[in-house]
Image: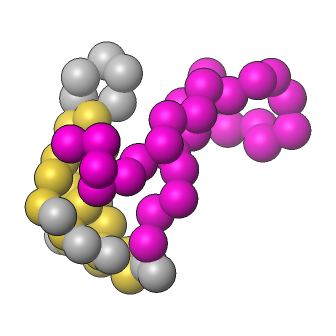
Amino acid sequence: MNDFFRCQCKKIVCQVVEDTIIIKCRHCKRYVHINTKGINSIQFKLTADTGKGEPQIIEFDECDK
């Protein structure tokens, strides 16, 4: 699996390569690699607060491609 993940506004947020999330810093252009054991879901929220509001949850699964 090698895919670009986009926000709902269509801007690329990160790249997903198998179990690694790759994010490019807008300022210094370095890449941050976040290694995971798999992605279960991705949540879109309008605020950074994790306790308020109902997030829109989108399941991120290889079968959904």
Quick one: quadrant of the C terminus? top left
Please indicate, yes or no, whether residue 24 appears anywhere in the rendered image: no
Find out whether residue 50 is within the magenta segment.
Answer: yes
- Work out whether 62 lies above or below 6: below
Q: Using residue 52 as the reference point, say whether residue 41 is left or right of it.
A: left
Q: In the picture, residue 52 is in which quadrant?
A: top right
Q: Position of residue 13 (x, y in %)?
A: 29, 43
Number of marks present in the image shown: 0
Span of residues in magenta? 38-65
Q: Nearer the viewer, residue 62 or 36?
A: 62
- Work out whether 18 lies above or below 3: below
Q: Using residue 52 as the reference point, say whether residue 27 is left or right of it.
A: left
Q: Position of residue 22 (x, y in %)?
A: 25, 66
Find out whether residue 63 is within the magenta segment.
Answer: yes
Q: Position of residue 45 (x, y in %)?
A: 61, 29
| Residue found 86% across the figure and 38% down from its top | 51
Q: Nearer the viewer, residue 32 or 44?
A: 44
- Work out whether 16 lies above or below 44: below
